Amino acid sequence: AERYYARGGHAEQAVEMYISRGEWEAAHKMAVTCMKPEEIAVLYITHAQEMEAKGRYREAEKLYLTVKEPDLAINMYKKLRQYDSMIRLVGQYHHDLLTDTHLHLAKEMEGENQYKGAEKHYIEGRDWKSCVNMYRVADLWDDAYRVAKQH
């Protein structure tokens, strides 16, 4: 079918055929030969957003990464509060922002009284003193002592 679409000057339809069947690698291979990079990006981002809406987050992530848009995948996971996946991508694509991201998440979780999650991110962000202070302010002295003793 791909050959017939290509011969008939309808390579975009071949790309859509592959996408509808979930054959993203074949779709991308074909798209690179017949579409502009901007068109490919729009196509993949649109389909990634559809995957997001259907709850197929790993597939959406893969599409975002295929068109070199890791920030869209990172934001998707942030909105979903899937922080482990978010941190994985930040570490992979924006390693220089990893510490700041951990601290941002820690402060956000602290504001929501999610102390264990905040602790994890404070420690990963190398700011154990803020973690101790968080527990102190929350009157959780055993936890404050435990963190201080460990670090």
Image (spheres, helix red, strand yellow):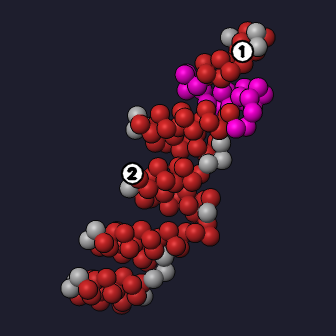
Numbered range of the magenta stretch: 19-38
Q: Where is residue 72 in the image (x, y as percent from the top left)?
A: 54, 49
Dominant SS of magenta comes to: helix
The residue sitting at 52% across, 58% down in the picture is 88
Q: Three-letter amino acid code at disc 2?
A: Leu
State the residue at coordinates (72%, 19%).
11
Quadrant in the picture for residue 93: bottom right
Query: Which residue is under mark 2?
Result: 80
Q: Distance between the residues labelled 1 and 2?
A: 37 Å
How many numbered marks, from 0 up? 2
Residue 1 to residue 119: above or below: above
Q: In this rendering, does residue 32 appear at all?
A: yes
Sooner in the amino-acid sequence: mark 1 or mark 2: 1
Q: Quadrant of residue 33?
A: top right
Q: Residue 42 carries which label?
A: none
Residue at which label 1 appears: 10
The answer to whether 16 is drawn above or below residue 119 in the figure is above
Residue 116 visible in image: no
Asked if labels 2 and 1 touch by Cβ distance under 8 angstroms, the answer is: no
Is the residue 35 above or below the residue 143 in the image? above
Q: Is residue 42 left or right of residue 149?
A: right
Pointer 1: residues within 10 angstroms few (<14), some, or many (20+)? some
Kind of residue indicated by mark 1: His
Q: Residue at x 51, y 54 (%)?
A: 74
Q: Is residue 49 left or right of residue 25?
A: left
Q: Residue at x 57, y 38 (%)?
A: 45
Q: In which quarter of the image is residue 46?
A: top right
Q: Position of residue 146 (x, y in %)?
A: 31, 86
Counting from the top left corner in percent of width and height, residue 89 is at 55, 56
Magenta highlight on residue 28: yes
